[in-house]
Amino acid sequence: MVVEPAASVPPLPALHAVPEHVAIIMDGNGRWANERGLRRSEGHRAGAEAIRPVLERFGQHGVSVLTLFGFSTENWGRPRPEVQSILRLGGDFIDSHLGELHEAGVQLRHLGELERLPGWLQKRVARAVKQTQGNSRMILNLAFNYGGRADIVSAVQQLIAEGVPAEEVTEEAISCRLATAGLPEPDLLIRTGGEARMSNFLVWQATYSEYYFTETLWPDFGPAAIDAALIEFGQRQRRFGLVSNDGDEDDD
Ligand code: FPP
């Protein structure tokens, strides 16, 4: 048997600033598979296998929350076998990684409408969330059957169901009813795969995120690509609608 040498992992670069919360649209699995003459499901499998090392690298950099867009509310419209393969991979990911993620102090959370997922996946997600709820080293949010607009609609429905009067419907009142309640908003939103759009991801929460788009396809998004994204983040000037300290006139 030929033993492949372990791929060398570049040393961690020094960063000017580390985002607390990174959110990622994991795009490009299908193209990754096409380029290799493989089925799309093989691309999703490679995409699922990329997750653990990505979490590790961001954790080493000091990122404390990682949110991954695994399956959107729109993805139900894909061919049934592809939908089934993505859902199965979500379940497999939990089965194969729950133990070691728990030991590593990672808290798993789910963003999205759990009830519409198949019962077997709901059970796995619920078990993973329950088992890891006391962990505090890092939070991994799996957005599975998630849609940003549906998240806002759900928050508004909760406000109405609670009888909150109109004058008390504030941004804070909505934020604390979203799937990400209690978490910092994403500082950095990454999309792999070369497209530059939001695709109904964290539409409320990412208002002041820094956006980073890369051509790298998700299964290839390894340590060097992660470091490049974080280095660029460290060079951005975040102003949150204010003017910069040196008094220039930009207002965004
Ligand atoms: C986008 O690539 C990717 C998805 C819609 C699914 C992502 C799923 C995984 C990485 C696997 C399971 C997830 C978890 C959280 C364990 P695409 O199919 O749109 O690629 P393309 O744009 O190249 O066609």
Image (cartoon, rainbow, N blue to C red):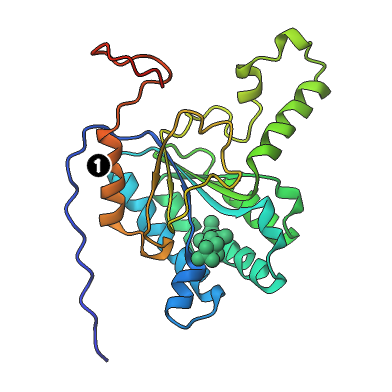
Q: What residue sits 38% from the left and 58% below the top?
A: 215
Image quadrant of residue 218? bottom left
Residue identified by numbered label 1:
231
Pinpoint residue 205: horizontal percent, then vertical percent.
Answer: 54, 31
Amino acid carrying mark 1 in the image = Ile
| Residue 57 spot, x, y in % from top left | 31, 51
| Residue 244 shown left or right of residue 183 in the figure | left
Q: Position of residue 178 (x, y in %)?
A: 64, 31
Does residue 93 show up?
A: no
Residue at (71, 59) in percent of width and height: 76
Task: Count up the numbered dots.
Answer: 1
Q: Quadrant of residue 219?
A: bottom left
- Judged from the image, the secondary structure of the residue bearing numbered disc 1 is helix
Residue at the spot x=71%, y=46% of the render? 113
Note whether 30 is above or below 73 in the view shown: below
Disc 1 crowd, CA 10 A, few/some/many (<14, 14-19, 20+): some
Residue 2, above or below 73: below
* Residue 252 is at least partly visible in this image: yes
